[in-house]
Amino acid sequence: MTSLKMPSVLVESPNTVYDGDFIEANYRYTSNRVTQKDGIFQVKPVEENIKIRTGRKLNKLGVMLVGWGGNNGSTLTAAIEAHKHKVTWNTKRGLKKPDWFGSLTQSSTVNIGYDSTDGSPVYVPFKDVLPTVDPEEILVDGWDISSADLNQAVRRAAVLDVNLQDKLEPFLKDFQPRPSVYKEKFIAQNQRERADNVLPGSDASMVDRLRADIREMKRRSDLVVVVWTANTESLCPVLQGVHDTADNLLRAIQEGHADISPSVLFAVAAILEKCPFINGSPQNTFVPGVTELAAREGSWIAGDDFKTGQTRMKSVLVDFLVGCGIKPVAIASYNHLGNNDGRNLHSKPQFEAKRVSKTNVIDDIVVSNSILYQPGEKVDHTVVIEYLPYLGDSKRAMDEYTSEIMMGGLNTIVLHNVCEDSLLAAPVILDLVVLVELASRIAFQTQHSSPDWLPFTSELGVLSYMFKAPVVPQGGNIVNALSKQRACIINLMRACIGLPPEHHIDLESKVH
Ligand code: NAI
C-alpha cells in the first residue's frame, strides 16, 4: 500500500467517521417495493441501515494491458508517460500540455452541496470525493502478439501529434510487450502479419506463463488489473461440458479444447491470480465457466466493450427522447474508420460480436416506457462498420434517429461525429482501472452480513457507465442509460462519505 491520502472533502456528521485507515459511513439505504393490484401500483418504501467502509490507503496500481501495442494501449501509455514527465509539445494551435479530457474521474466534477454564504452550488473534482489513485503513479505493462515496442506502437497508431511522439520516444522505447496467446480462429485473418510475438505451447502452459507474468507485476505493485484491449474476437460457442462450469472450463483448458479463446485464457489467468479482469471488447469472454470461477475465487470481472463514442451518444440520446415522451422507432448507425480495429472488424465473425453489443444498448430504455412501447416491441435498429484505411484512427460515426412525435408526426435527428477513436477510449480505460482500485477498498456491512464486511459482487456492475453491454450478477438489472449509470457511481461515492443521493430538488431556491 502507498501513502495515506488526506481527504479533500471532509464530512462533518456523526454518521461519517475518519478512523485511521478507513472512512466509515452509517448510511440509510432507501428503495421502494412495488406490487400491482387491480390496476393500482402499491408502493412500499423500505430502508436499511448499512455501514460502508472505504480504505484510505491507496494501492500501488499495476495495469496489464492485453493488446498493449494497439491504438488504445499505446495511447493510454503515452498519455500516462506524458503526464509523469510533464511533456509539452508544439502544435499549429500553440503549445500543448497533457490533460485527461474525456475522463470521468480526472476531468469531471461532482456537486457536494451549496455554499454556506451565498448558496451557490459547490463542485469538487470527481477524483477528490474519495481518495483515488493518481494516474501518474500507475505502472503499465502488458502483452501483444506484435513485437513492436511502445515507441513504435505509438508511431504506428498515428493518433498523437508527431511532435509529442518524438518527445515521448525516450520514455516509451523500453516498453516491450510480452509475448501473447494467438489463435487464428478467433481474430480476423488480416491480423496474421502482425503476429510475431506469440507464445508457444498448450493452452495450459500458456495460462501458466500468463500467471507468471502477472505474478511478476504483482511484485512491483499491490493490485494488478488486467484489461483486454486487444482485437475483438469472434463470439465463442458456449459448449456444454466445456464453457458451462468453472471445473469444466479448467479441465477443457488442460485438455487443449479448440474452442477456448485467448481472452478466456487471460480471464482465467487473472482470476486465478485474484486480479480484476476487465473486458474492453464485445466478445463473450465471460462464459458461465468464467463467471463461476470469478465468484469462486473472489475475483472481480467487468465488461463488456468500452462505451466511448457512438454508443455512448446513443445511450444519452435515446434516454433523452424516451424521457421526453418521444418514441424512437428507427436508428441507423454507420461507422467508417481506418485503424487496425476497423481492419479486424471488417471480418464478419468479429463484426458480429460488435454488432450485438452496439444494438443492445437501448434495451433498458425501451422497456422503461410502456406508454410508447408494447411488451416485446423493438426499435428498428441497424449498425454498419466499414473499413477505410486512409482515415486511420479518425472515426466517422453517422447516425440517423427517426422518432414518432405527436399526432402522426415524424422527427429525424442526424448526427455526424468525427474524432480519434483512441482519444475517447484511453481516458475510459484510465477511469476503469482507477475505479476498480477504488472499488477494491470499499466494503459493506448490512443488517444480514454483520459483523462481516462484504466486498462488491464479482461482476462489477457499478462500472456499467464505461461499457456498451454491462455485465451484472445473474438476475441483476442491466442499466444502459448513461445518466443513470453516472448517477449510480456518484451516489455510491457520496454514500461512502455518508451523504444522501444527489436529488437536484434545490428546495432552497424554490421555496422561501
Ligand atoms: P488495435 O487493433 O489498434 O489494438 C489491438 C491490439 O491487440 C493490437 O496491437 C494487436 O496486435 C493486439 N492483439 C490482438 N490479439 C491479441 C492477443 N490475443 N493478445 C495480445 N494482443 C493481441 O485496436 P484498438 O483500437 O486499440 O481497440 C482495441 C479493442 O478495444 C478492440 O477490440 C476494439 O473493438 C475495442 N474498443 C475500442 C474502442 C475505441 O473507442 N477505440 C471502443 C470500444 C471498444
Image: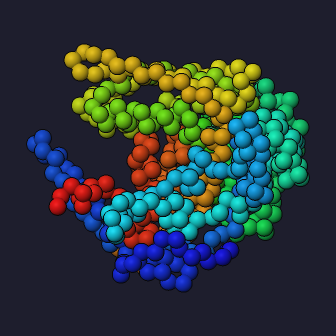
- The residue lying at 24 percent from left, 57 percent from top is 509
For residue 342, above or below residue 368? above
The percent coordinates of residue 432 (x first, y second) are: 59, 53
Visible residue check, residue 384: yes
Quarter of the figure with residue 365: top left
Q: Residue furthest bottom?
A: 20
- The residue lying at 33 percent from left, 29 percent from top is 376
Q: How is the image coloured?
A: rainbow
Q: Nearer the viewer, residue 495 or 472?
A: 495
- The residue lying at 51 percent from left, 59 percent from top is 126
Q: Nearer the viewer, residue 307 or 144?
A: 307
Q: Nearer the viewer, residue 401 or 362?
A: 401
The percent coordinates of residue 161 (x first, y second) are: 77, 38
**Residue 428 horizontal side relative to residue 141, left or right:** left
The percent coordinates of residue 205 (x first, y second) are: 82, 52
Visible residue check, residue 474: no
Quadrant hosting ligand 1: top right
**Residue 235 horizontal side relative to residue 476, left or right:** right
Q: Quadrant of the N terminus?
A: bottom right
**Residue 376 horizontal side relative to residue 226, left or right:** left
The percent coordinates of residue 442 (x first, y second) are: 51, 68
For residue 363, above or below residue 386? below
Q: How many marks?
A: 0
Q: Quadrant of the C terminus?
A: bottom left
For residue 12, above or below residue 125? below
- The residue lying at 46 percent from left, 63 percent from top is 493
Q: Nearer the viewer, residue 10 or 226?
A: 10
Quarter of the figure with residue 27: bottom left
